[in-house]
Amino acid sequence: MLVFGRKPASSCEGRASAQLTAPSGVAVDSNGVLYIADTPAARVRKVSGGVISTAAGGGSKLGDNGPATSAQLLEPQAVSVDSGGNLYIADANRVRLVSGGTISTVAGNGSAGYQGDNGVATAAMVSGPTGVAVSPAGNLLIADTGNNRIRQVAAGLIATAAGTGTYGFTGANGSPTSAALGAPSAVAVDAAGNLYVADAYRVLRIAGGKIAPIAGLDSPQGLAVDSAGNVYVSAPSSHRVYVLAPAGAACAATISPAPQTAPAAGGTVSVGLQIGAACPWTVESLPAWASVSGNPFGTGSGTVTLSAAANRDAPRTATIVIGGQTVNLAQAGSATIAGQVTLAAGGGLPGVSVSLTGSQSGSATTDSGGNFSFSSLDSTLGYTLTPSLAGYAFLPASQSFASMTANPTANFVAWPLPAIAGMATAFPSVLQTSPTTFAPGEIVSIYGTNLCAAAAVAAPTLPDRLAACFVQVDGVNIRLYYAAPAQINAVLPQTLAVGSHQVVVVRYTDTGYKQVAAQSQALSFTVVPIAMAFVERAAGTQTILAAQYPDGGLVDSTRPLHASDTVVLYLTGVGQTAKVFPDGAAPKTASQALQTVQVQVQGMTAPVAYAGVQPQYPGFDQINVKMPKYTLSPGQSAVTFRIAAPATGQTLTYSLPAN
């Protein structure tokens, strides 16, 4: 019976003889109004009371938030109507909604692709949707054909309800989002909220968080579910509409034998299937090396013949689903373990010795590209591979394989070991011999190779990690000012005890600090109560001690010292102070050093008003000195500073311009 349409003619709006070009989807609302997706005409037609009209389409622009009949549709493929009479249209790379005569987009941005899951549906990408449905809860389901997914829109947000995005037919009886779909073309929902999907040759049901096939058909394209749970499927290739009635126990399948073994040379195995005479079944989850002789779907009991290709590699197994039942297919073979050792910075590393231990033993050396292999291994046994080369650490340190069902790959990343060449004060001196011992809380520089990643500077609070590395003193992380491959500037702990200690650099794979790549050998150093290292600066062609007036000006030949002046000297290494501050944080307040500092100018005692922390920077210290009433001989233009630490006997001598 022809309900509406004729060919050929004009559009004939309003009459049963109206022209429809190639309708591809229909839906009926609760009032009996029929909606038709007329794809080539780029319209959705509406039939009410025997009269046909355009419900959407016919315009020349998108037309969102305007009259649906003035909006442009591109390729309307499917329609669905919810309980409120709202019309949903799968159109090219969008899903449109017509409500109260106004059209809008509810999913897709018009560009074909896959993105946007768990975000706003209208900003997401869909790819050629060909089916839509609305659940009893009001959620929109989309057969996102080009993306091999079923997408769901709830509260304006889009997510994947089924499919992995890869074309295929795997994952039966598992999670819907872990199952592969083959270009899903239709979607429907029953009164209980169970979801039905048609893909390239299956009809699947999603219920209770599981997906399972209920029929195998050649290219099913349309789905509908009635109140009794009957599923109607259109199959254009066979020119039929099928009805799938709830099966009950009559369609429970049994398989014999379930475990199957194919020879290494390849061949066929037969599986007996017992199922009700009218019950459909499909073969799913076939691996690439196995196929079905004949159709991968059918009806009633029979024999399924599986064909396995020749296997010259590792023994392999696959779990195949036939009629909802699993068949374990195994095939014999031999194994090769191959791999590559690459540098963390990129490129293969030659000359690495890779040892094979376990059921068989051997060794291989990587070639110019870092490649190696071990062949003709009994894949039922176990093996461990361990790389080694002086000066490198490897991730992972070793890899183990047992009962191999495919040829495994054993790749390793080589990390050059951090190497500490030495440690010095962060303020190296041109004028004095730099101390070789260090004080608690002192700023130090660690020199070496492969220490950290690209140069990075920390501020204002110092972290205990920087540029993908840690520095540890006696196993405890210390705070870092600067980190680079060849140098690290760090602050020793304020509470570090006098005596011998060890420092190491720990390199991580990245700044996520979850995987240690390599660690240096320990360097021993000695801590003393005080080890002063002053800031020096360039003054013209000379290097002089940095001395600052209270107004911020610096002492030099243009502004020489005078008797009774007060100056500030900056340094690191005064040692412990009266207060202990949080590691890595600026003190923000003064705190006097516990060790005495003595200053003489021209042999006269210069009062030290303060020796302790510089409040703005961790590990930075200062000494405030008042000049004595010295006198200079005629023609003399400099004074001599003698700075001493009685606790250690350290004495430093400097000369500064003076009048």
Image (tube, grey):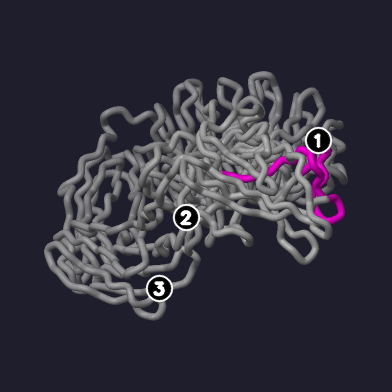
Please state the extent of the stretch shown in magenta in the rendering.
548-572
Q: Callout 1: helix, strand or loop?
A: strand
Residue occupied by mark 1: 54
Q: Which residue is mark 2?
A: 436
Check the image and report above or below for 299 versus 447.
above
Please tell me how crowded label 3 is: few (under 14), some (14-19), or many (20+) other residues with Cα within 10 Å: many
- Horizontal relation, residue 210 to residue 637: left or right: left
Q: Nearer the viewer, residue 265 or 648?
A: 648
Residue 38 on image: x %, y %: 72, 43
Q: Are the residues tagged 3 and 1 within 8 Å (C-beta)?
A: no
Crowd tier of the residue under label 2, counting other residues whose Cα lies within 10 Å: few below 14, some 14–19, many 20 or above: few
Residue type pointed to by label 3: Leu
The question of residue 155 being in magenta is answered with no
Task: Please provide percent x and percent y for residue 458.
Answer: 62, 45
Q: CA distance from mark 2 to mark 3?
A: 38 Å
Question: Which numbered disc, 3 or 1, marks the residue that appears first in the sequence?
Answer: 1
Residue 308 in view = yes
Determine whether the residue tagged by mark 2 lies in a helix, strand or loop.
loop
